[in-house]
Image (cartoon, rainbow, N blue to C red):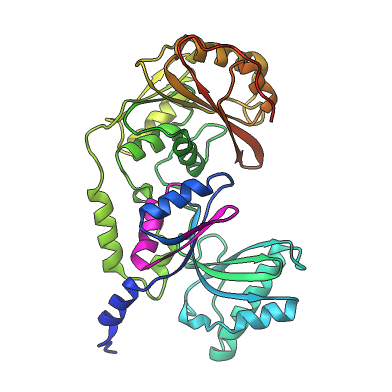
């Protein structure tokens, strides 16, 4: 069947603005807001683990490729109030779902419920699924299938105080799953969290960057991608959610992809160095770095941090030492005391950032933190501690929260 108006209509959609919601981790909202502003999004507004803005289809595609601290990029399609089950079912049915996906496409619903008369997100997701399926069955006599693992179309339902936002999930699989990480250690750091910590450090992407407890190399790779201006979405193995949408514009996305590829800086922009005392971790980091194509940018050595010295006069050091949660230390307080001593004696001139979920052990570092940023590593309450290591740093008792 001919579609003579297809091209002009698609062009019009490219420039048409709509609301966009980007989700992130607690504490990274302002970082994500800056990333969205860099993509020329309008009306950027920070919320709790979300940033809302306005943009067009090209910017939606760009956000999925470029946002380092976004978990998902959502396109809201409907807002309504649902006081009870009947309300929710009827309101969901007011959307014509055949505009968004077909019978032969699978779908799934992610529901988040807070401070509402509905207590369980799974129940809300199930009721929403029933309303959608019943609409298809009434119109066609058939129903689409649900695939919770790898759906063609992923929907997001957010309910707060019985106000519901229904959105299309343009990302599909979570954006923190970059695709470069083939090997991990026992407690790998979420890529979005790693990128957020580096951004919060204020690193200029030119001075020396060191991770002296490199593990599987996540900090190093995220730092290198920033320095080389590599879009994290370029490593993606699975399709983005929007590639299964009915209004997917393949030519537009290919243009966005090619533009991102062209922005990469090939020559190393900064000295990026990692150490780890465990040879298995060093091997894992090197495997991941090679998979990201960044061997020419990142150097990883097998070394004991406590026996290392700063290779340059200035730079940024970022580390994620054990908390005694998933990785156990024989004497956690002594470990943190040695970290403080090594930073004080061997890394003068650096800004050091210690990310930890053991706030008691952190006091043993013995240096005064100039900044303490609350973050979470999964469910673990953490702090990003900044230490400005001037020549002759004075030891001082850690300030309490």
Please name whichever residue, 6 or 59, is drawn nearer the observer in this view of the structure.
Answer: 59
Q: Can residue 330 be seen in this view?
A: no
Of residues 237 and 123, the one drawn nearer to the viewer in this rendering: 123
Q: Which residues, given as a range, are shown in magenta?
A: 44-69
Residue situated in front as seen by the camera: 303 or 119: 119
Q: Which residue is at a point 40% across and 38% down the rendered structure image?
A: 222
> Does the magenta run of residues contain 49?
yes
Does the rendering let one see residue 372? yes
Mark count: 0
> Where residue 138 appears, x then y in whole percent?
59, 90
Can you give x and y, in whole percent of width and height, for residue 89 in the image? 67, 80
* Magenta-drawn stretch contains 217: no
In the depicted structure, whether residue 39 falls above or below residue 291: below
Choose top left, top right, bottom left or bottom right for residue 1.
bottom left
Q: Residue 282 falls in which quadrant of the image?
A: top left
Residue nearest the observer in this picture, 329 or 19: 19
Residue at x-position 43% and y-position 34%: 202
Q: Residue at x 49, y 82 (%)?
A: 98
Taking the image as shown, residue 260 lies to the left or right of residue 16, namely left
> Residue 37 in the image: x percent, y percent?
40, 54
Residue 398, horizontal then vertical, whole percent: 65, 20
- Quadrant including the C terminus: top right
| Residue 9 against residue 241 in the figure, above or below | below
- Please state if 372 lies on the left or on the right of 317 as rendered: right
């Amino acid at each position: 069947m001919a579609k003579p108006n297809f091209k002009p209509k698609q062009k019009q959609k490219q420039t048409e603005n709509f609301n966009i919601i980007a989700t992130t981790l607690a504490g990274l909202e302002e970082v994500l807001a800056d990333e969205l502003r860099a993509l020329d999004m309008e009306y950027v507004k920070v919320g709790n683990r979300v940033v809302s803005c306005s943009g067009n289809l090209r910017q939606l595609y760009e956000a999925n490729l470029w946002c380092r601290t976004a978990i998902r990029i959502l396109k809201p399609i409907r807002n309504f109030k649902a006081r009870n089950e009947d309300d929710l079912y009827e309101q969901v049915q007011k959307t014509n779902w055949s505009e968004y996906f077909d019978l032969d496409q699978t779908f799934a619903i992610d529901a988040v419920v807070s401070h509402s008369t509905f207590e369980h997100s799974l129940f809300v997701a199930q009721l929403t699924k029933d309303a959608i399926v019943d609409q298809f069955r009434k119109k066609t006599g058939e129903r689409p299938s649900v695939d919770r693992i790898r759906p063609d179309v992923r929907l997001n339902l957010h309910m707060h105080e019985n106000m519901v936002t229904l959105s299309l999930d343009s990302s599909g699989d979570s954006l923190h799953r970059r695709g470069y990480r083939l090997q991990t250690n026992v407690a790998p750091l979420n890529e979005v969290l790693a990128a957020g910590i580096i951004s919060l450090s204020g690193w200029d992407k030119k001075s020396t960057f060191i991770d002296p407890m490199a593990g599987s190399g996540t900090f190093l790779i995220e730092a290198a991608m920033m320095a080389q201006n590599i879009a994290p979405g370029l490593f993606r193995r699975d399709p983005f959610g929007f590639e299964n949408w009915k209004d997917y514009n393949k030519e537009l996305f290919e243009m966005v992809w090619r533009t991102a590829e062209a922005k990469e800086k090939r020559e190393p922009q900064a000295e990026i160095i990692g150490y780890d005392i465990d040879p298995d971790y060093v091997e894992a980091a090197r495997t991941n770095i090679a998979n990201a194509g960044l061997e020419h940018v990142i150097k990883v050595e097998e070394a004991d941090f406590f026996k290392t010295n700063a290779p340059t006069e200035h730079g940024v050091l970022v580390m994620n030492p054990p908390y005694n949660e998933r990785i156990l230390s024989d004497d956690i307080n002594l470990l943190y005391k040695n970290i403080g001593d090594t930073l004080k004696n061997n890394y003068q001139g650096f800004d050091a950032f210690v990310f930890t979920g053991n706030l008691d052990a952190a006091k043993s570092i013995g240096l005064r933190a100039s900044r303490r940023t609350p973050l979470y590593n999964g469910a673990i309450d953490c702090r990003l501690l900044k230490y400005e290591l001037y020549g002759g740093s004075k030891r001082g008792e850690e300030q309490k929260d």
